Image: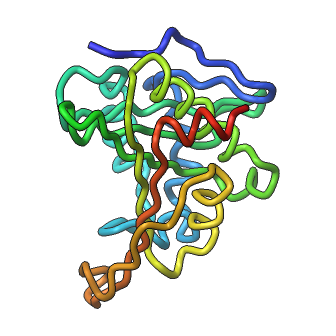
Amino acid sequence: MYAPTYPIRTARLTLRPVTLDDLDDVHAYQRRSDVVRWMRGAGPRTREQSRASVRAMAAEDALRAEGDCLTLAIATGAGVIGTVELVWRSRPDRTAELGYVLHPDHGGRGLATEAATALLDWGFGELGLHRVFARCHAGNEASARLMSRLGMRREAHHVRSYLFRGEWADQLVFAILADEWRARAR
């Protein structure tokens, strides 16, 4: 089992497992259409749907087996403003996928970058990952910019590669290797 020593603290954030007490904060952004706009198969959530989401995320506190997701709440003095996650895609290849969601009211200040950086530090350090990748809808410019800020390179532009809201959509794939991450940190 792999889990960070909680909490992970950065200059402005605390990353920790999601708890059932986070429902109000999580629902505050999950109910917004601008948050779920680029999420596959997701629409604005009702409070009950957010409750189910919080329950699921609360169980994602460690990586126990390939395919598991580690989801951490991004917390500030204002409460939980989003989540950042690593999905363990391949144990033999030491590969994970990065994901994130941030309440738009807290955007534009580098908080998502700060949270993702802290989780990647743990993933490449303690977990010993070799490669982390992330994907987004080609129209999600904010997400693509975040991946670039993290030092990830765009590796692919898959044309009409998946169904998104009933239409074929393009997808961008970004990635970074452990040695690139360490060189970036220097």
Residue in view at x 62 percent, y 60 percent: 148
Left or right, residue 129 beside residue 91:
right
Near-viewer residue (94 or 63): 94
Residue in view at x 55 percent, y 42 percent: 180
Specify the quadrant that holds the C terminus.
Answer: top right
Residue in view at x 43 percent, y 49 percent: 47
Question: Where residue 156 sits in the image (x, y, percent)?
Answer: 39, 72
Number of numbered discs present? 0
Residue in view at x 52 percent, y 81 percent: 139
Near-viewer residue (33 or 122): 122
Near-viewer residue (124 or 21): 124
Residue 155 vertical placement versus 125 (above, below): below
Residue 176 vertical placement versus 126 (above, below): below
Question: Where residue 28 sits in the image (x, y, percent)?
Answer: 59, 49
Question: Where residue 2 sits in the image (x, y, percent)?
Answer: 33, 16
Specify the quadrant that holds the N terminus.
Answer: top left
On the image, which quarter does residue 146 sit in?
A: bottom right
Residue 123 vertical placement versus 140 (above, below): above
The residue sitting at the top extreme is: 5
Question: Where residue 35 sits in the image (x, y, percent)?
Answer: 55, 63
Q: How is the image coloured?
A: rainbow
